[in-house]
Amino acid sequence: MPTPTNNLAALLTAAFIVTTAAPFAGAETHHVVGGDRGWDVDSNIASWSAGRIFRVGDKIWFAYSVAHGNVVELARKEEYKACDVSRFIREYRDGIDIVALNGEGIRYFASSRAERCKKGLKLQVHVEAQQQKGETTGVGSRNDMSEGDGESAAVPPSPSTSSTPFAISYVTLSLLLAGLAFTYWIS
């Protein structure tokens, strides 16, 4: 006969499997812009984004010091290339901002301070369709930082507060281990 602790261990195990499998089942990816250094002139944003794949449903995180300016989203490629940040379509001011990539297309982000933008603190994101089950990613599906001839308007963002699937997985793993330890302790 199953005991309550066995039921708890089984439930925690199932929760762990479901949450750790989510990233591999087409779930969203969270991209921290600039990696460990975040949104900073010294983080080499162009290098960080080269080869990175951004898909509909992903989220990009901007972590920065507001003392050094904010992040703005620009509508046109010309504004992005020239670092003309005077006519932005959206400004992010919190120091940690999450931007949902809800539609295909190209989006342009830059420092709200033109001098920092001109030093490389800008990001062009090519958002692709969600990967279909069983689809493999080819070379042509990588984020292209080239400044080609195509003209693209930015896709308006919508706010999101969801957390990363990997953070959920670590919490679930911790709960699983705690439940197993509790089961062992009372046995």
Image (cartoon, rainbow, N blue to C red):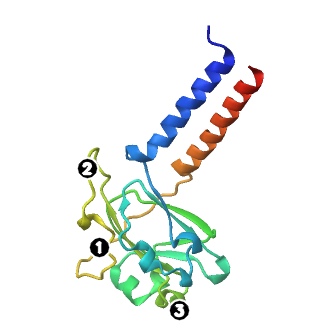
Q: Quadrant of residue 144?
A: bottom left
Above-or-below relation of 16 to 43: above
Q: Residue at x 51, y 89 (%)?
A: 114
Q: Residue at x 36, y 56 (%)?
A: 56
Residue 17 drawn at (x, y percent): 50, 35
**Looking at the image, is mark 1 or mark 2 nearer the viewer?**
2
Residue highlighted by disc 3: 115
Dot 3: few (<14), some (14–19), or many (≥20) neighbours within 10 Å? few
Q: Amino acid at mark 1?
A: Ser
Left or right: residue 70 compared with residue 86: right
Distance, label 1 to label 3, CA atoms, is 24 Å
Residue 12 drawn at (x, y percent): 60, 30
Q: Tag 1, which secondary structure?
A: loop
Residue highlighted by disc 2: 135
Q: Tag 2, which secondary structure?
A: loop
Q: Quadrant of the C terminus?
A: top right
Q: Residue at x 55, y 36 (%)?
A: 16
Q: Amino acid at mark 3?
A: Glu
